[in-house]
Image (cartoon, helix red, strand yellow):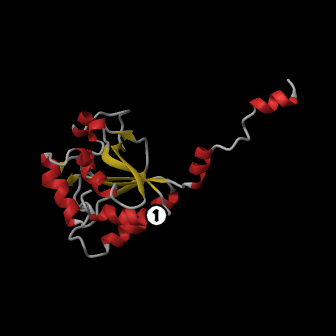
Amino acid sequence: MSNNAKQSTDTSSTPDPAAASRATTREELATFGAGCFWCVEAVLERQNGVIDVSSGYMGGEVVNPSYKQVCNGDTGHAEVVQVRFDPRLVSYDTLLEWFWRLHDPTTMNRQGADVGTQYRSAIFYHSEEQKQRAMLSKKAEDESGRHVSRIVTEITPASTFYPAEEYHQDYFRLNPRAGYCRAVIAPKLEKLGIEDK
């Protein structure tokens, strides 16, 4: 093959605009369990700097669990949201502040009427830095005087994230008139001073 022919087929040095964009956009993951994932998703997806929020399951024993399996308490998974965020626009510490505000971290395996290990309060960290930030944040929250009881939130390494079924994704946005959305999520957003977009 001649040099000319080689040059015409070799694209390894051709700039890839999409790759360049990904290289300059630094994204990180955060994963939280704070009761029903519909509520957590509705709060966190409205925060500046959050790119995407997916509802799913983490922290259990069963591969690719279904919602029914998780709700039966047979898998050990927590309902979680996995947050993709731009740390230049929102810090992990800020997401932790929202995490503490949007649920009661002092109730073991329960949020309101939702009861079971799948509703436990949990922070799944993706790096040693996140672990340290989460532990410091939990200590500060525990000592803040905002809670009558001690915080029971678990802080554990992130494991495999299993996305929940499609009908759980963006649940509040797609079903604002549903009973749970009107009775639980909308009042929570109002209480937190978050505009219902």
Task: State which quarter of the image contains the C terminus.
Answer: bottom left
Horizontally, residue 9 falls left or right of residue 112, namely right
Task: State which quarter of the image contains the N terminus.
Answer: top right
Q: Is residue 112 visible?
A: no
Does residue 7 lie above or below 194 as drawn?
A: above
The image quadrant of residue 134 is bottom left
Q: Residue sitting at 20 percent across and 63 percent down?
A: 190
Q: Residue sitting at 54 percent across and 54 percent down?
A: 25
| Amino acid type of the residue that numbered disc 1 sits on in the rendered structure | Leu
Does residue 74 lie above or below 128 as drawn?
A: above
Of residues 164 and 167, the one nearer the viewer is: 167
Of residues 159 and 42, the one nearer the viewer is: 42
Q: Position of residue 47 (x, y in %)?
A: 36, 60
Q: Position of residue 120 (x, y in %)?
A: 27, 52
Specify few, some or many for label 1: CA neighbours under 10 Å numbering under 14, 14-19, or 20 or more.
few
Residue sticking out furthest to the right: 2
Of residues 197 and 153, the one nearer the viewer is: 197
Q: Position of residue 10 (x, y in %)?
A: 75, 33
Does residue 160 lie above or below 144 as drawn?
A: above
Q: Residue sitting at 27 percent across and 41 percent down?
A: 168
Horizontally, residue 2 falls left or right of residue 14, namely right
Labels in figure, total: 1
Label 1: element kind: loop
Q: Residue sitting at 16 percent across and 54 percent down?
A: 184
Q: Position of residue 111 (x, y in %)?
A: 20, 55
The image quadrant of residue 4 is top right
The image quadrant of residue 189 is bottom left
Name the residue tied to disc 1: 89
Q: Is residue 57 visible?
A: yes
